[in-house]
C-alpha cells in the first residue's frame, strides 16, 4: 500500500503516443490485432466444420469432446506450449486463442443450424432449393442469432484473454499490467483494465448492431407481437 | 519431448517446498478454497434469484463483467492495492472470477425448469421452499453442475496466472521458467496444469453421473 493516486493523468498524456514500443496507442493496436484475428480465423474454420457436424452427427461428438478439452486448458498453458513452436511472436497468442474461439463457435453453429424450424427447412425444399442454396440462403440466415451469440462470447473472451499473453511477452495492453506491477504504479494497470473493458463493450455493441442488420425479420416480428 | 524428460526426470523437481508434489498440493489448496467460497456465495444466490425472479440484472451484469475483465489486470491491481504477503489479496480476485459462471448457470437452471412442473408441484400443495429444494433444484442440477465445472476450471486457470503476483502452485514453474529461460520447466509446468484441468473436467463428468437424477438425465 502506498500513497500513489489510482490514476495519474499526466502519465497517460505523456505515454499515449510517445513513439516507442510501449506507447499506449501501439499496445492498443497490437491488442486489437491479437484479439480479433483469432475470432475471424475461428469463424472461418467453425462455419464449415459446424455445418459438417450438423450434417454428419457422428462427427459432432468427438469434435465437441476435443473442443471441451481445449476449452478447459488455461490460456497460459497453451501460450507456454506454443512458445516452443512459434517463439516470441504474435502467433503464440493468436493460434491458441483461435482454438478457444473454435471451442465456442462450433457448438454455436451446430446449435444455430439445429434451431432452424423443420417447417422452414421443408418449405425451402418444396420451393425447389438445392441443399447448398438452402444452406446459404435459408438455414444460415435463420441460424444467425445463435451463431452471433457465440461470436459475442468468443470476441469478449478473446479481448480479455490476450492480456495474459503479456506473461510471455506478447500481451498488447496486458503489458501495462506487468509494467505497473514491476514499478508498483497503479496508473498503467487501471488504463489497461479500462481500455480492455471498453474494447469489449464496443465490440459487443457492434455485434449486437450487426445482428439487428442481419436479421431484420426478428424486429418486425417483435413489433407485430 | 527432451524438455519433458529434463523436467520430469530431474529428481530435484520431485522433493522439497518447490518440488512437484508440494506445488500440486498448493495449487489444489488455493483453488479449492476459492472455489468453495465462490460456490457458497453463488449457488444460494442463484437459486434465490431464479426462484423469486428478483434481481436478475445482477446475474446478467456479473456474467458480462466476468468475461470482459482481464484476469491478470484484476490480480495485479488488487494485490498492489491490498498488499503482498498474505494469501487473502490473491484469493479475492480468484473468488470474484469464480462466482459468475456458477451464478449464471444456477439461475438459468432454475429459470429453465418447465413451468408445468413448477405448477404441478404447487398444485400438489408444496410450499415455496419445498418447491425450490425438492423440485427445482434437482431439475436444475445438470446446469448447476455445469456452472460449478466452468468455475472450477476458471479457478485452476486463474491460480496459474496468480503465480505472477507471488502465489505458489504450479504456475510457479511457468513464471519462473520464463524468467530464467528454463523452457523445460515452462513446458513441464504447462503439462502438469493441463493434466490437473483435465482431471477436474473428468471429476465433474463422473459427479454428473452420480448425483443427477436418472429422470432428469433422460430428458436432456
Image (cartoon, helix red, strand yellow):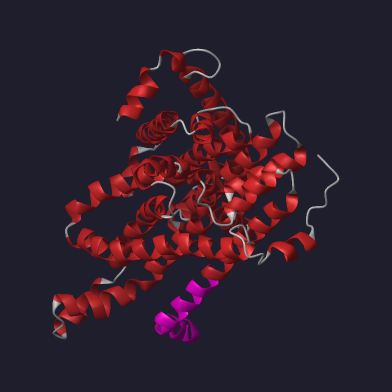
Q: Is residue A192 left or right of residue A217?
A: right
Is the N terminus of chain A in the top left, top right, bottom left or bottom right quadrant?
top right
Q: Is residue A115 left or right of residue A205?
A: left
Q: Residue at x 51, y 64 (%)?
A: A32
Q: Residue at x 57, y 70 (%)?
A: A202
Looking at the picture, tell me which residue is in the foreground, A102 or A64. A102
> Is A208 covered by the magenta stretch?
yes
The percent position of residue B180, horizontal first and vertical second, equals 52, 32
Q: Is residue A195 left or right of residue B83?
A: left
The percent position of residue A172, horizontal first and vertical second, equals 55, 56
Q: Main secondary structure of the magenta part?
A: helix
The percent position of residue A110, horizontal first and vertical second, equals 29, 61
From what the image shows, is residue B24 above or below residue A76? Answer: above
Instruction: Write down the region rendered in magenta.
Output: A204-225
> Is B145 covered by the magenta stretch?
no
Looking at the picture, tell me which residue is in the foreground, A38 or A19. A19
Amino acid at each position: 500500500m502506498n500513497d500513489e493516486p489510482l490514476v495519474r493523468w499526466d502519465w497517460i498524456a505523456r505515454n499515449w503516443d510517445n513513439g516507442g514500443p510501449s506507447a499506449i496507442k501501439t499496445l492498443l493496436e497490437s491488442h486489437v490485432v491479437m484479439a480479433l484475428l483469432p475470432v475471424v480465423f475461428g469463424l472461418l474454420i467453425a462455419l464449415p466444420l459446424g455445418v459438417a457436424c450438423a450434417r454428419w452427427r457422428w462427427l459432432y461428438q468427438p469434435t465437441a469432446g476435443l473442443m471441451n478439452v481445449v476449452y478447459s486448458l488455461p490460456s497460459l498453458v497453451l501460450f507456454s506450449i506454443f512458445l516452443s513452436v512459434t517463439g516470441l511472436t504474435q502467433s503464440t497468442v493468436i493460434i491458441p486463442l483461435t482454438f478457444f474461439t473454435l471451442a465456442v463457435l462450433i457448438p454455436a453453429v451446430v446449435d444455430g443450424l439445429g434451431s432452424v424450424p423443420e417447417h422452414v427447412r421443408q418449405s425451402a425444399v418444396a420451393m425447389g432449393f438445392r441443399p447448398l442454396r438452402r444452406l446459404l440462403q435459408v438455414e444460415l440466415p435463420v441460424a444467425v442469432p445463435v451463431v452471433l451469440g457465440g461470436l459475442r462470447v468468443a470476441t469478449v473472451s478473446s479481448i480479455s484473454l490476450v492480456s495474459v499473453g503479456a506473461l510471455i511477452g506478447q500481451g498488447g495492453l496486458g503489458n501495462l499490467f506487468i509494467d505497473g506491477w514491476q514499478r508498483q504504479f497503479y496508473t498503467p494497470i487501471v488504463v489497461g483494465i479500462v481500455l480492455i473493458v471498453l474494447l469489449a463493450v464496443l465490440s459487443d455493441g457492434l455485434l449486437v448492431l450487426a445482428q439487428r442488420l442481419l436479421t431484420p425479420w426478428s424486429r418486425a416480428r417483435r413489433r407485430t407481437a | 519431448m527432451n524438455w519433458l524428460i529434463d523436467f520430469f526426470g530431474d529428481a530435484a523437481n520431485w522433493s522439497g517446498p518447490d518440488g512437484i508434489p508440494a506445488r500440486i498440493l498448493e495449487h489444489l489448496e488455493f483453488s479449492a478454497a476459492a472455489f468453495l467460497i465462490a460456490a457458497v456465495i453463488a449457488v444460494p444466490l442463484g437459486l434465490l434469484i431464479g426462484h423469486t425472479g428478483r434481481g436478475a440484472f445482477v446475474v446478467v451484469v456479473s456474467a458480462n463483467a466476468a468475461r470482459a475483465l482481464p484476469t491478470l489486470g484484476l490480480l495485479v491491481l488488487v494485490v498492489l492495492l491490498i498488499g503482498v504477503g498474505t494469501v487473502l489479496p490473491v484469493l479475492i480476485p480468484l473468488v470474484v472470477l469464480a462466482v459468475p459462471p456458477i451464478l449464471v448457470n444456477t439461475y438459468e437452471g432454475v429459470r429453465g425448469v418447465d413451468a408445468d412442473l413448477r405448477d404441478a408441484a404447487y398444485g400438489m400443495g408444496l410450499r415455496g421452499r419445498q418447491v425450490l429444494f425438492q423440485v427445482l433444484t434437482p431439475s436444475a442440477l445438470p446446469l448447476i453442475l455445469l456452472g460449478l465445472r466452468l468455475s472450477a476450471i476458471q479457478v485452476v486457470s486463474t491460480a496459474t496466472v496468480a503465480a505472477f503476483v507471488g502465489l505458489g502452485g504450479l504456475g510457479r514453474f511457468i513464471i519462473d521458467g520464463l524468467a530464467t529461460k528454463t523452457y523445460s520447466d515452462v513446458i513441464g509446468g504447462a503439462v502438469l496444469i493441463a493434466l490437473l484441468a483435465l482431471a477436474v473436467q473428468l471429476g465433474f463428468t463422473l459427479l454428473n453421473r452420480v448425483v443427477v437424477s436418472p429422470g432428469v438425465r433422460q430428458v436432456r
